[in-house]
Image (cartoon, helix red, strand yellow):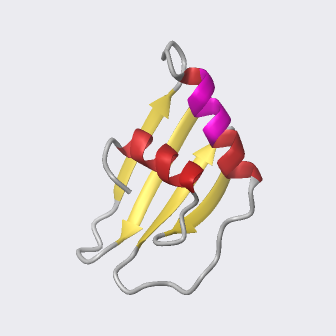
Amino acid sequence: MRIEVVRSGGFAGIPRHAVLDTAGRPDAARLTSLAEAVLAAPPPSGPPVPDGFTYAITADGRTTHCADPHLTPAQRELIQTVLGEGA
């Protein structure tokens, strides 16, 4: 599975983009399961926060959008893994 995360917003407004291919990874099953859970669940909602990050998560041709501080644990873990940094 190819998982793409695009982060935008934040204080500086500098976008960040990363793609992760699960093929051949030892954690492929866990990442695929996380991505499927993130895409299947309705995005959490709440008021936007000034200078907060927003995320677009795409896998298998489907995209969902979410934003800090309203990330689910699955969204946060997937974002951290794909971007390689804290979310």
Q: Please tell me whether the stretch drawn in magenta is mainly helix, strand or loop.
A: helix
The N terminus lies in which quarter of the figure? top right
Residue, x 27% and y 66% (percent of image)? 14
Corner quadrant of residue 49: bottom left
Residue 75 percent across, percent down from the top left = 55, 53
Residue 34 percent across, percent down from the top left = 62, 39
Residue, x 33% and y 41% (percent of image)? 84
Location of residue 13 with respect to 5 vertically, above or below: below
Which is nearer the eye, 85 or 8?
85
Task: Specify whether 31 is left or right of 41.
Answer: left
Which is nearer the eye, 85 or 13?
85
Residue 38 percent across, percent down from the top left = 66, 50
Residue, x 57% and y 32% (percent of image)? 31
Residue 61 percent across, percent down from the top left = 69, 43
Residue, x 68% and y 38% (percent of image)? 60
Q: Can residue 82 be seen from the camera position used here?
A: yes
Segment tinted magenta in the rendering: 29-34
- Please say whether residue 73 is one of the residues in the magenta stretch: no
Location of residue 68 with respect to 78 vertically, above or below: below
Task: Specify whether 31 is left or right of 42.
Answer: left
The C terminus lies in which quarter of the figure? bottom left
